[in-house]
Image: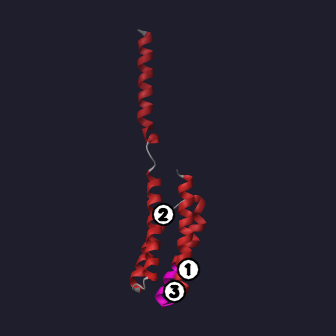
Amino acid sequence: MKFLKKIAVSLLMAASMTAVSSTAFAAPEGAAVVKAAAEGTVAKIEEAVNLVEKGGDKAEIVKAINEARQLQKEFRYELTERQRQKANDKLRIARDAFEKGEMQPAEATLKAALASFQEMLSTYNAAHQ
């Protein structure tokens, strides 16, 4: 009887530990949000570059840049944080230049920001595969 009690208590403890720590076995939700934000940021910047190359409306270009700036806020990865801040500054500078009508410097700055975000995305993907 003592032996059966020990087995029952051991099984009960093991079951409760598994139930409590089941969240440790779940896939991290934060990683999915960060990856989606990074991919969305790159897509919006690419959209802005395409609009510039096609001679799109200035308001549409600024809107795409603003959406990219909002999405990049969720792209938090420790190894690329400083680079993200610098690339966000480039997006802001590009937006301001587009609003002033300075198309050439704005386009160059936008392409530099795109290259930076693509590099950050590849760094993130390499670390999370």
Left or right, 79 with respect to 26, comes to right
Is 97 contained in the magenta span? yes
Disc 1 versus disc 3: nearer the observer: 1
Q: Answer with mark 2 or mark 1, whichever residue precedes in sequence.
A: 2
Report the residue at 46% width, 63% height from top: 39
Report the residue at 44% width, 17% height from top: 7
- Residue 89: tell me if it is visible: no
Q: Secondary structure at mark 1?
A: helix
Report the residue at 45% width, 21% height from top: 10
Name the foreground residue: 116 vs 91. 116
Disc 2 designates what residue? Answer: 38
Q: Position of residue 74 (x, y in %)?
A: 47, 63
Q: Answer with mark 2 or mark 3, whichever residue precedes in sequence.
A: 2
Measured Cα–Cα span from mark 2 to mark 1:
19 Å
Q: Position of residue 5 (x, y in %)?
A: 42, 15
Q: What kind of residue is marked 1? A: Thr
Examine the rendered structure and indicate whether residue 61 appears above or below residue 126.
Answer: below
Name the foreground residue: 104 vs 124. 104
| Residue occupying the far bottom of the picture | 101
Q: What kind of residue is marked 3? A: Ala
Disc 3 designates what residue? Answer: 97
Name the foreground residue: 115 vs 74. 115
| Residue occupying the far front of the picture | 54
Measured Cα–Cα span from mark 2 to mark 3:
24 Å
Q: Secondary structure at mark 2?
A: helix
Q: What residue range appears in magenta?
A: 92-102
Residue 109 circle label: 1
Mark 3 Cα-neighbour bin, 10 Å: few <14, some 14–19, many ≥20? some
Q: Secondary structure at mark 3?
A: helix
Asked whether the beta carbons under mark 1 and mark 3 sit within 8 Å of each other, the answer is yes
